[in-house]
Image (tube, rainbow, N blue to C red):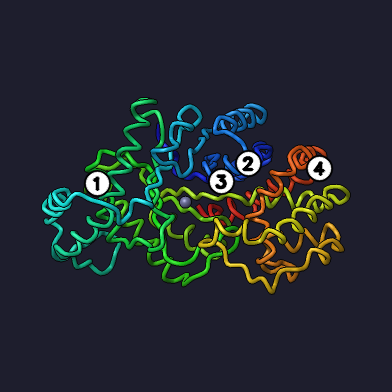
């Protein structure tokens, strides 16, 4: 199984927007933008909402059947590790092996020595086609990279072997992710990480590094866009060099775990993949849930009442909801409206504060980030929330589709 050149991961916390999400890919395809949809959901989301990985497979298959989607699609076991991969074995055909926690962990000294010896041919000036300046590689640098990352690659090898034993070689797509960690990986580090991945025998088709800058949930990129652009282009050059150098899968591509909505880097990403003729996997998550709230609010009546209640409840449980996401949100509490104010808002006022259109004066990124992490509140509403999604399906679906199509697929891929 080979992942296609362009793919976008979408999350659907409550499992009801599969068709509305797929519709965005169908409309994009009609306008010449061919992107493979991937449905992703992590163990944490499943636990919070009370869903199971098999539900995602059922949802994806049903959406594809109902809308007669003839293209390929995947179900991503997102951010899994050895302890929970079994839960995803049946439903997944795309596995994101999350080994960030093993970075900097225990590693066998003999293992490090063997890696350094094998890679010593790169000591000196390393010229990578497409990158202007050669990198200066020392034995110390290789040793440092090996010491930091070999444990993580070995962990990825263990997870991969477990999946391969259960599902069979070549029947699934493998991604190695190292994004949920404090320090970004440099292009040189990525080069040697890919060497280790190849040594380990992992047929990685996508790799998700941590890029520099902040990738806060549901809001735009925070960081130096020029620096990101340079790094991203260098990563693309490193990957195409590593494919031939280490014999990795020829379709190996970068996976950007965006935390959704990194609009200011979509342009540079689109230009870079076009320039390099490279593929891309872009993972978004959580914004479909926000489009549900927007659709409910805009529909008015009970839909708006639910959206207002979710906010009141979220504000009252700020620390509890934000705690698990502390490193990936940045909410300025002084910019949050009071719950009483929000109760006075019309559906359009609520929708405009939440919808991610930065040029709209009513847009409030702090309001948006708090609601992004507040899906637990809606999950606790149970059937009341789920029934409202059915009642106001037209309004919700229109917002879900428009978001993926207009704010993600078109800005990223329109120029291909
Ligand atoms: Zn990630």
Q: Is residue 116 visible?
A: yes
Which secondary structure lies at badge 1?
helix
Question: Who comes first in sequence, dot 2 or dot 1?
Answer: 2
Which residue in the protein does label 4 denote? 392
Whichever of callouts 3 and 2 sits on the residue coming sooner in the sequence is: 3
Q: CA distance from mark 3 to mark 2?
A: 33 Å
Residue 243: % across, % down: 28, 46
Q: Secondary structure at mark 3?
A: loop
Task: Give the Cα separation between the discs numbered 2 and 4.
Answer: 21 Å
Alpha carbon of mark 2 to alpha carbon of mark 1: how far? 43 Å
Instruction: Say whether marks 2 and 1 touch (CB < 8 Å).
Output: no
Residue, x 46% and y 72% (percent of image)?
A: 224
Q: Residues within 10 Å of mark 1 (few under 14, many from 20)?
A: few
Rate crowding at label 2 as few (under 14), some (14 to 19) or many (20 or more) other CA atoms within 10 Å.
some
- Give the labeled residue for mark 1: 244
Q: Looking at the image, is mark 1 or mark 3 earlier in the sequence? A: 3
Q: Are marks 4 and 1 in contact (CB under 8 Å)?
A: no
Give the residue at mark 3: 33
Q: Under tag 4, what secondary structure?
A: loop
Residue 374: x, y in percent? 66, 53
Could you say which quadrant of the image residue 20 lies in? top right
Q: CA distance from mark 1 to mark 3?
A: 28 Å
Disc number for residue 159: none
User: As drawn, which residue projects farthest toward the bottom?
Assistant: 334
Q: Which is nearer the eye, 315 or 206?
A: 315
Q: Earlier in the sequence, mark 4 or mark 3?
A: 3
Position of 343 compared to 249: left or right? right
Instruction: Please give the label number shown on residue 49.
Output: 2
């Amino acid at each position: 199984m080979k992942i296609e050149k362009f793919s976008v991961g979408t999350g659907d916390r409550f499992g009801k927007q599969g068709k509305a999400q797929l519709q965005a890919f169908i409309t994009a395809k009609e306008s010449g933008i061919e992107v493979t949809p991937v449905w992703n959901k992590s163990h944490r989301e499943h636990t919070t909402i009370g869903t199971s990985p098999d539900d995602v497979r059922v949802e994806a298959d049903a959406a594809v059947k109902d809308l007669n989607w003839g293209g390929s699609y995947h179900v991503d076991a997102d951010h899994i590790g050895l302890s929970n991969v079994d839960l995803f074995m049946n439903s997944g055909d795309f596995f994101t092996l999350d080994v960030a926690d093993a970075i900097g962990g225990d590693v066998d000294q003999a293992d490090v020595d063997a890696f350094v010896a094998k890679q010593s041919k790169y000591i000196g000036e390393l010229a990578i086609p497409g990158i202007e300046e050669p990198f200066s590689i020392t034995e110390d640098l290789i040793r440092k990279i090996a010491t930091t990352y070999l444990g993580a690659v070995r962990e990825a090898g263990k997870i991969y072997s477990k999946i391969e034993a259960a599902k069979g070689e070549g029947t699934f797509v493998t991604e190695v992710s190292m994004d949920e960690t404090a320090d970004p990986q440099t292009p040189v580090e990525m080069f040697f990480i890919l060497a280790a991945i190849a040594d380990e025998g992992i047929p990685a088709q996508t790799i998700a590094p941590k890029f520099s800058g902040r990738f806060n949930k549901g809001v735009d990129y925070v960081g130096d866009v020029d620096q990101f652009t340079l790094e991203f282009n260098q990563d693309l050059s490193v990957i195409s060099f590593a494919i031939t150098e280490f014999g990795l899968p020829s379709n190996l591509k970068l996976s950007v775990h965006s935390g959704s909505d990194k609009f200011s880097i979509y342009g540079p990403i689109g230009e870079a993949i076009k320039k390099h003729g490279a593929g891309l996997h872009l993972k978004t998550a959580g914004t479909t849930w926000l489009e549900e709230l927007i659709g409910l609010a805009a529909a008015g009546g009970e839909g708006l009442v639910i959206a207002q209640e979710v906010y009141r409840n979220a504000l009252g449980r700020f620390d509890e909801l934000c705690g698990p996401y502390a490193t990936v949100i940045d909410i300025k509490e002084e910019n949050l409206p009071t719950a009483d104010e929000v109760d006075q808002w019309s559906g359009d006022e609520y929708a405009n504060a939440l919808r991610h259109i930065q040029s709209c004066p009513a847009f409030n990124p702090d309001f948006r980030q708090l609601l992004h992490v507040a899906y637990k509140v809606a999950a606790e509403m149970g059937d009341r929330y789920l029934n409202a999604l059915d009642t106001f399906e037209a309004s919700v679906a229109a917002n879900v589709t428009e978001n993926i199509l207009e704010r993600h697929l078109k800005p990223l891929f329109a120029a291909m």
